[in-house]
Amino acid sequence: MFTVHYLDHPQDGDSQVLAGRDYFWGSVGGPIYVLAKGFPRMALWMTLASIGIALAALLLIVLAVIVTSSAAITVVAIVGACALAIVVQGMVAVELVRIGFLQRGYREGYY
């Protein structure tokens, strides 16, 4: 689920590893994490993705509230939708950073 990405730059020998810590900060920070990694254009894409992820989570929550009358199921749906949104945001953020590094000439998978 959370793939570790190893990236090397062939000319300057720089290496980047995108692992668990990056997924955490991507989940928490979203566009700020992507911007902090040095990718302003990707941060704009991440902002749009974050809005879409939040709207999808809100839609799931509203759907759960409409479909069920049980408070317990509604609470589980709210917690589940929020957790899913956080996980998806981290995965999207790391993927955008990985794409940004690849566009800068890094190559993946040489370890």
Image (cartoon, helix red, strand yellow):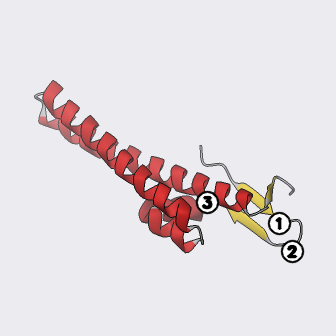
Identify the mark nearer the N-term, 3 or 1: 1
Label 3 environment density (alpha carbons within 10 Å; few <14, some 14–19, many ≥20): many
Tally of numbered tags? 3
Q: Position of residue 12 (x, y in %)?
A: 86, 74
Quarter location, residue 47 = bottom left
Q: Is residue 64 left or right of residue 7?
A: left
Provide the residue designation for mark 1.
Answer: 9
Q: CA distance from mark 3 to mark 1?
A: 15 Å
Provide the residue designation for mark 3.
Answer: 97
* Extreme residue in the left direction: 69
Q: Secondary structure at mark 1?
A: loop
Q: CA distance from mark 2 to mark 3?
A: 19 Å
Amino acid type, residue under disc 2 in the picture: Asp
Circle 2/circle 1 CB separation < 8 Å: yes
Q: Is residue 47 left or right of residue 67?
A: right
Amino acid type, residue under disc 3 in the picture: Val
Label 2 environment density (alpha carbons within 10 Å; few <14, some 14–19, many ≥20): few
Provide the residue designation for mark 2.
Answer: 12
Q: CA distance from mark 2 to mark 1?
A: 6 Å
Q: Position of residue 95 (x, y in %)?
A: 60, 52
Q: Position of residue 6 (x, y in %)?
A: 76, 58
Which numbered circle lies on residue 76?
Answer: none
105 or 36, which lies in front? 105
- The residue sitting at 65% across, 60% down in the picture is 100
Quarter location, residue 101 = bottom right
Q: Which quadrant: the C terminus? A: bottom right
Identify the mark nearer the N-term, 2 or 3: 2
Label 1 environment density (alpha carbons within 10 Å; few <14, some 14–19, many ≥20): some
- The residue sitting at 14% across, 29% down in the picture is 66
Amino acid type, residue under disc 1 in the picture: His
